[in-house]
Image: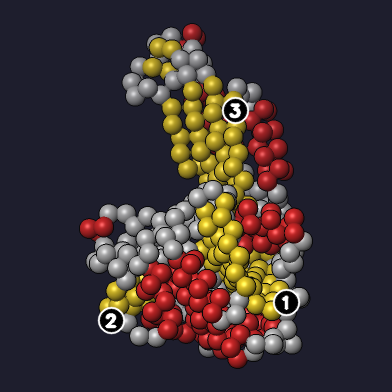
Amino acid sequence: MSEVLGLACELIARASVTPDDAGCQELVAARLQRAGFAIERLRFGEVDNLWATHGSGAPVLVLLGHTDVVPPGPREAWSSDPFAPEVRDGVLYGRGAADMKGSVAAFAVAAERFVAAHPGHAGTLAVLLTSDEEGDAIDGVRRVARVFQERGQRIDWCITGEPSSTARLGDLLRVGRRGSLSGTLTVKGVQGHVAYPDKARNPIHQAAPALAELAARRWDDGYESFPPTSLQVSNIHAGTGANNVIPGELQVLFNLRYNPHWDAPRLEAEIASLLDRHGLDYALHWHRSGEPFHTPEGRLRAVAREVLAETAGAPPEESTGGGTSDARFIAPLGAQCIEVGPVNASIHQVDEHVSVADLEALPGLYQRLIERLLLL
């Protein structure tokens, strides 16, 4: 069994359902400490964070990952125990195999090999791990980034190991992410009998024109490699369950995925203005998951494009698609951020898996990225 496969299996065997790290970071920390890394543990609430560094000064290159996983769902739906890693026909199965314990294992192996080969390298190589990426994302990298800001910790480049590839390893380079903003809208009415609408106020009827306008609106035409901003209503709830009762309240859940044309405060103000114009009696609660970020052309993108083209045999697609990642908390520190990882085909699914061949290629891919950035 290869070094990276063995470590990935050890990590998968720890049932680190968010925010429980279940000892994953200690396993990685022990390896990196033996390799000469300085280790700092940053625990906030129930969340473990690991900051491991080798070298000093600029440039600072961070390998960013998470050790927590989503719940496996019904165990009986899996072909094998989700926390008992198993290789079948050249594929590693287990919760977190692709998202993202495989990348964490590859980060550790690549970092060990790099510092063994280049102990006096320029700048700083760092590994940052959290156990709060799949959960609330409050006490993980978001909180660590605030600590770094207070310290004045510089970060020049950040490589996140999220599963970014589509059909083969290295065929996509993620150079940014859309922002995510969620809203909970409560529209207040007056409950009553459906036969006497004059004695009630139906919040569904009142909100429908405003919701139709929000759903139909074209927010922008996109931004560079970003698609247009999108608003999606994800849930509507009202009523008592009886067909002869006008509800007294309507609740609507919605989410915006947006590009750098916008920021959260402007979107919030725009939507509140629309609801006011429709004369609604409402309350609106916002959750800001993260602002969009975009890495412009520069050394990081150029090096990554070159390494991924060597890996995949063709230049990678450069994309800002997908959901969010913890890079959204590192980018505001002034860092250029990219995401490079295995094929994204089974994450969060039953029988999550990663190709063993891809997993065994990852440390070399990450090591080439590190060498071309830090060996000046």
Query: Residue sitting at 50 percent across and 34 percent down?
Result: 252
Q: CA distance from mark 3 to mark 2?
A: 54 Å
Query: Residue sitting at 47 percent across and 53 percent down?
Result: 19
Q: Amino acid at mark 3?
A: Ala
Residue 292 showing in the rendered view: no
Given the current orientation, which residue lies at the most extreme bottom position? 117
Mark 1 or mark 2, earlier in chain: 1
Q: Quadrant of the C terminus?
A: bottom right
CB under 8 Å between discs 1 and 2? no
Q: Quadrant of the N terminus?
A: bottom left
CB under 8 Å between discs 3 and 1? no
CB under 8 Å between discs 3 and 2? no
Q: Position of residue 330 (x, y in %)?
A: 66, 61
Q: Which mark is residue 89?
A: 2
Mark 3 or mark 1, earlier in chain: 1
Q: Check disc 1 and report the residue beneath it.
A: 56
Viewer-closest of 191 and 325:
325
Q: CA distance from mark 1 to mark 2?
A: 43 Å
Q: Position of residue 306 (x, y in %)?
A: 63, 85
Which is in the foreground here, disc 3 or disc 1? 1
Q: Check disc 3 and report the residue beneath it.
A: 283
Q: With respect to residue 180, does 312 lie above or below? A: below
